Amino acid sequence: MTLPPKSDKKQIKKIYAVGSGKGGVGKSSVTSLLAIAAARQGKRVGILDADITGPSIPTFFGLHTFPFGNAEGIEPPASRSGIRVISMNLLLDDPAKPVIWRGPLLGNAVTQFFNDVQWGELDVLFVDLPPGTADAVLTVMQTIPLDGFLLVTSPQELASLVVRKAAKMAEMLDIPLVGVVENMSSLRCPHCGERIELFGGSHAEALINDVKATFWGSLPLDTEMAALGDEGHLEEYTNAEVFSVLEKGLANLF
C-alpha cells in the first residue's frame, strides 16, 4: 500500500490518537480527561476533534467561541485550563445542525484541522477519532504524524471485537499501540457502595493479549463526570480513581 506523505509535526512534541472503532464507549470523554490530566501536570495540551459528524469535545469544556483566522491560519479557542480545541461544532452557527458530508469532505476537514490550525508549541495533541475505520479515521492515520494510538473499549464482548478491528488497522498502518483503557467498567451504588458491572465482566485481559498492548486500567461509570461534562465543567472533575489510571498511562507517553 502506497501511503500519502505525513504532514509536518510543527511545534508539537507528541501526537496521540484516541479511538476504538466502535461508538458509545466513551472515546471523547477519555480524550478530554487525558487532556485535563496532562494539563494538570503542567503540559501544553491540544485536542483535535476528528469526529466531524458527531463532535462533542467543546461541550465538555463549555467552549462556544468561534475560532478566528488570520493570514497564518486558524486560532483555536482555549479552555479554562488552557487546553486548545478545534472541532466542527465550533464552526457551526447552530451546534445542533447536522454535518451531512460524504467521505472526501470529511477527510479534507480533518486535514485542515491539523494543517491550518495554529497549534503553537504543544507538549501533546490528542486526536479524538470517530467510530469506524473509514475515511476520517484513515485520514488521521495516514496523514497526521502520530506517535501512537490509544484504544478505548468497554466490557461488552461486542465492543472488544470491534476494538480489535481498530487495532489491526493501526498495525497495518504502522501506528504503535500505546495502551488500552477499559471505560464504563462498573458503577458504584450511591447507597451501599457495591460495584455493579452493568455491561458484564471485563474482557480486557483477552483483548490486550490479542493486540499486544499495555493495559492502563479500568475507568468507572460515574454520574458526577457525566453531569460536569453536560454542564461544560469537566475540568472540575477530580475522581482520584479515574485520574490515577490516566496519570499512570500518561507516564508511558512522555
Image (tube, rainbow, N blue to C red):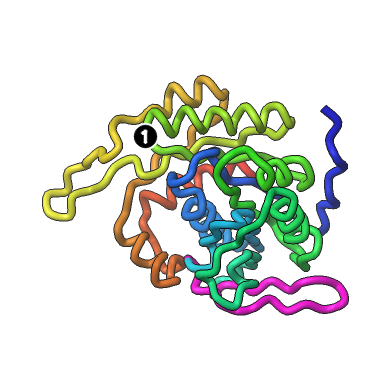
| Rendered-image quadrant of the N terminus | top right
Q: Is residue 91 left or right of residue 98?
A: right
| Depicted 106 relative to depicted 143: above or below | below
Look at the magenta stretch and give its main secondary structure.
loop
| Depicted 228 relative to depicted 104: above or below | below
Disc 1 packing (10 Å; few <14; some 14–19; many ≥20): many
| Depicted 120 relative to depicted 107: above or below | below
| Depicted 108 relative to depicted 165: above or below | below
Q: Which residue is mark 1?
A: 155
Q: Secondary structure at mark 1?
A: loop
Residue 85 in the image, given as x and y percentages of width and height? 63, 66
The boundaries of the magenta stretch are 60-80
Q: Which residue sits at x=71%, y=46%?
A: 140
Residue 116 lies in magenta, yes or no?
no
Q: Quadrant of residue 173?
A: top right
Three-letter amino acid code at the position of disc 1: Pro
Residue 75 lies in magenta, yes or no?
yes
Q: Nearer the viewer, residue 159 or 202?
A: 159
Q: Is residue 12 left or right of residue 237?
A: right
Residue 109 in the image, given as x and y percentages of width and height? 72, 58
Residue 196 in the image, given as x and y percentages of width and height? 22, 41
